[in-house]
Image (cartoon, rainbow, N blue to C red):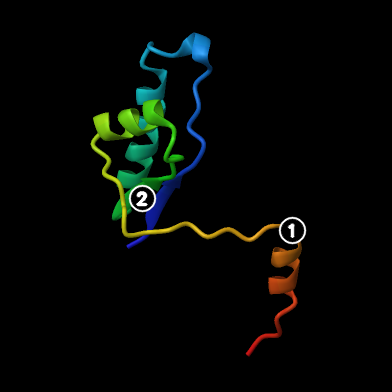
Amino acid sequence: RPGMYLEDLFVLPAARGRGIGKQIFAHVARLAVERECGRMEGAVRDWNEPAIGFYKKMGARAMDEWTVYRLTGEALRDAARVPDE
């Protein structure tokens, strides 16, 4: 089944503590349910304790067995030049 990926959920510091993040999170979760997604995932930097706490509070759990890999710059351009097999 498809999944929903949430990236960069950010609420300005002055607006935090008002439930805005929860409302955004719930809206995306509703979209995932409506679209019959099997999961909703997001990325949080390992040093961002407030964000980790938020995701845990919302019922999310860490996927410790996964590692994110990223291509940028020359490595991305090099990968784009690999001929189709």
Residue 85: horizontal and vertical position, in percent? 63, 90
Name which residue type carries label 1.
Answer: Gly
The numbered disc on residue 60 is: none
Which residue is denoted by mark 2 in the rendering?
Answer: 35
Q: Residue at x 48, y 32 (%)?
A: 9
* Mark 2 element type: loop
Instruction: Count neighbours of disc 2 (C-alpha within 10 A) and say few if under 14, some if 14 to 19, many if 20 or more.
Output: few
Amino acid, disc 2: Arg
Residue 70 against residue 22 in the figure, above or below:
below
Tally of marks: 2
Q: Is residue 54 left or right of residue 70?
A: left
The image quarter in which residue 17 lies:
top left
Q: Residue at x 26, y 44 (%)?
A: 61
- The numbered disc on residue 73 is 1
Which of the two discs, 2 and 1, labels the residue nearer the N terminus? Answer: 2
Q: Is residue 76 left or right of residue 27?
A: right
Residue 24 is situated, as x and y percent measured from the top left of the image, at 41, 28
Residue visible at 32% across and 63% down in the picture: 1
